[in-house]
Image (cartoon, rainbow, N blue to C red):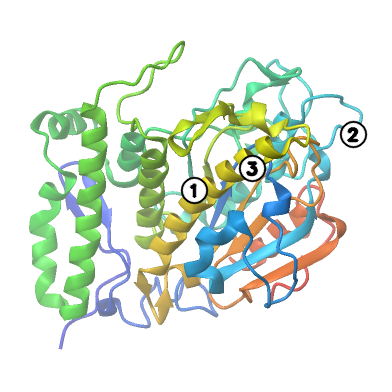
Amino acid sequence: MTSLLSRRTVLKGLGASIALPWLEAMGPFSPWAQAQASNRVPVRMAFLYVPNGKNMADWTPSATGTDFTLPRILEPLADVREYVNVLTGLTADKARPNGDGAGDHARAMAAFLTGAQPRKTDGSDIRAGISVDQVAASRIGNQTRLGSLEIGCDPSALAGNCDSGYSCAYSSTISWRSATTPVPKLNNPRLVFDRLFATGNDADRARRDRNRRSILDFVREDANSLQPNLGANDRRRLDEYMTSIRDIEERIERAARMPEPPRPNMAQPTGIPQSYQEHLRILSDLLVLAFQADITRVSSFVFANEGSNRPYGFIDVREGHHDLSHHGNDRAKMQKIATINRFHVTQLAYFVNRLKNIREGDGTLLDNCMIAYGSGNSDGNRHNHDDLPVLLIGRGSGTIRASRHVRYAFNTPLNNLWVSMLDRIGSSVERLGDSTGRLANLT
């Protein structure tokens, strides 16, 4: 009979520590399995953001309830449809001008997770509100190695005027630790990996880089010592887990060796892939690992900064995203926006399918997640912040009924959803930003 392992068992080596995924040897009564009184495994939450709104005609299902057809933009989610809720009618009121004039892109991102009206300034006196992910991190972050993880494909800028008198902090950071403290995101996969797995001093890290050896090489002996305590299923899980870490390391190394793409007026950091899709997927894989190993239970992931004018030539859309979003009801431009929207959803599908394919407890990792995906703008041409495109994916350890299109009353606060998600990780608050209560009809 094998002995039980602690959920806090880690593999350690020179300046590195790697937390383990859930294993049967940890038993049903391990500290990790009892992280919540009513659930065997903890609930994770992630907030994924895409800019510039959607082509809503190709986003919104025509029928409500369970009997709906995935529209063109959402078709890539077909394999995980049983986990998907399309939530229609939610509003980010504090992204509206409310007397402050232009600047809808900056407000869209700043208000998305905070429900707070950002102060219109391009100086150092920025102010918004604490974001839902940071509320969660402040309450459950002490249970994991990282309280939260903030990642994205574009860098965060904390100074400058990026949108009609609004600081760049508003349009490039989505997480706010306090009303005056935005949390910059990491966009270099190498740095994300180091944050998740590497410890120790600069000399340790330099030695690993100099020898071009994987972190796993330093923990191999520790991993081998666990083998006698593991059954066949656990040995397979551990091997798959370590293989996935190795794969990501090799992809990061490969990206670092590739020639730098021509990027006028912007130096591309080492370790960021030349391919935008690969960049999104490496970051997705890292987030999956972070959730799988319970390194963190809270994350924000920005696919592109608000107002991004990135072209998408690799899917035959050569115009800038932001430029196209001001389509003036031109059907050709609207279809190109839908193509960009579908590309982003395809990357979302890649991420959630990874979560779905990892067994955890009696279900999958996706069963124990709440993945919110959306934008603080609805129609990019109108710059409206009502009827936002929002998905909630995952079952929150059985606390969310999925596979539905739910239509809410006009102007229902988006923050009501965030308050309801906080309830499900044991971090209830009476109010967050402009919330007016809990979001009905999730269970």
Distance (Cα) linking label 2 and label 1: 31 Å
> Badge 2 is on which residue?
98
Among numbered discs 1 and 3, the one appearing first in the sequence: 1
Among numbered discs 2 and 1, the one appearing first in the sequence: 2
The circle on residue 127 is none
Q: Is residue 252 above or below residue 292?
A: above
Q: Quadrant of residue 326?
A: top right
Q: Is residue 14 above or below residue 346?
A: above
Residue depicted at x 64% and y 67%: 85
The circle on residue 148 is 1
Mark 1 element type: loop
> Badge 3 is on which residue?
335
Mark 3 element type: helix
Left or right: residue 50 compared with residue 406:
left
Front residue of this view, candidates 10 and 421: 421
Q: Quadrant of residue 174?
A: top right
Q: Residues within 10 Å of mark 3 (few under 14, many from 20)?
A: some
Residue 24, visible in the rendered structure: yes
